[in-house]
Image (cartoon, helix red, strand yellow):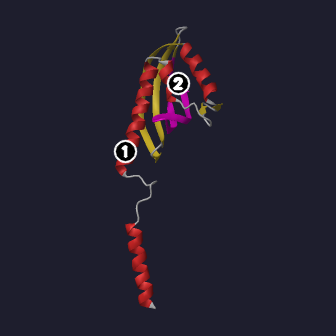
Amino acid sequence: MVRAMFAFFVCAVIAQGCAPASPDVMSEQEKAAVAESVGKRVEWYVAAIRTLDLDRMLQFWADTDGFVFAGDGSLTIGYDAYAAQLRDAIGSTAQVNSIEIRDPQVYVLSRDAAAYSMEFEWSMTSVAGDTTRSRGAWTYVFKRLDGKWKVVHSAGKHLYY
């Protein structure tokens, strides 16, 4: 009986060891590739902000059910509502004086999802000539949709000074 139990245990261990890896398990190289790709997408977005390229900025966000933008204590639910706010903000901005991203942190959720958090600092001048400065922290939740990284949820806080 002991031999049979031992043989069963050995066979079970060998079978488990020979089983194919779960498709959900990602290698460190795969995680690094996702993190790099998401980081490049944020750099792309920052470049669009610097040039006030509204069309590119809108492409950063996911026009999908469940989109939420949580900023400075309020929720904007739905892509269309957020896009309208972004259009208004960019329409009243004359120039971006500076924008800096610091300490980016990426947490890979899957091959097609990741969270990206960062600290930021920027300065912008309005069409009325007023300069606004802000720093803070922000988090984006990305999902790969149609081969592109898009933000489905976003949250953060501006500290104006």
User: Between residues 90 and 99, which one lies in front from this camera angle?
Assistant: 90
Is 73 drawn above or below residue 35 in the view shown? above
Residue at left 39%, top 33%? 40
Identify the image quadrant of residue 153: top right
Query: As drawn, which residue projects farthest toward the bottom?
Result: 1
Query: Which contiguous range is marked in magenta?
Result: 132-161
Q: Circle 1: is it few (<14), some (14-19), or many (20+) Cα within 10 Å?
A: some
Residue 109 spot, x, y in % from top left: 48, 47
Residue type, mark 2 in image: Leu
User: Between residues 143 and 68, which one lies in front from this camera angle?
Assistant: 143
Is 126 drawn above or below residue 104 in the view shown? above
Q: Is 37 left, or right, of 75 in this rendering?
A: left
Residue type, mark 1 in image: Ala
Our reading of the magenta stretch's main secondary structure is: strand
Q: Is 10 left, or right, of 57 in this rendering?
A: left
Residue 16 spot, x, y in % from top left: 42, 69
Q: Which mark is residue 58?
A: 2
Q: Secondary structure at mark 1?
A: helix
Query: Mark 1 = which residue?
Result: 32
User: Between residues 139 and 5, which one lies in front from this camera angle?
Assistant: 5
Q: Is 57 left, or right, of 72 in this rendering?
A: left
Residue 82 spot, x, y in % from top left: 60, 26
Query: As drawn, which residue projects farthest toward the left?
Result: 29
- Residue 145 among magenta residues: yes
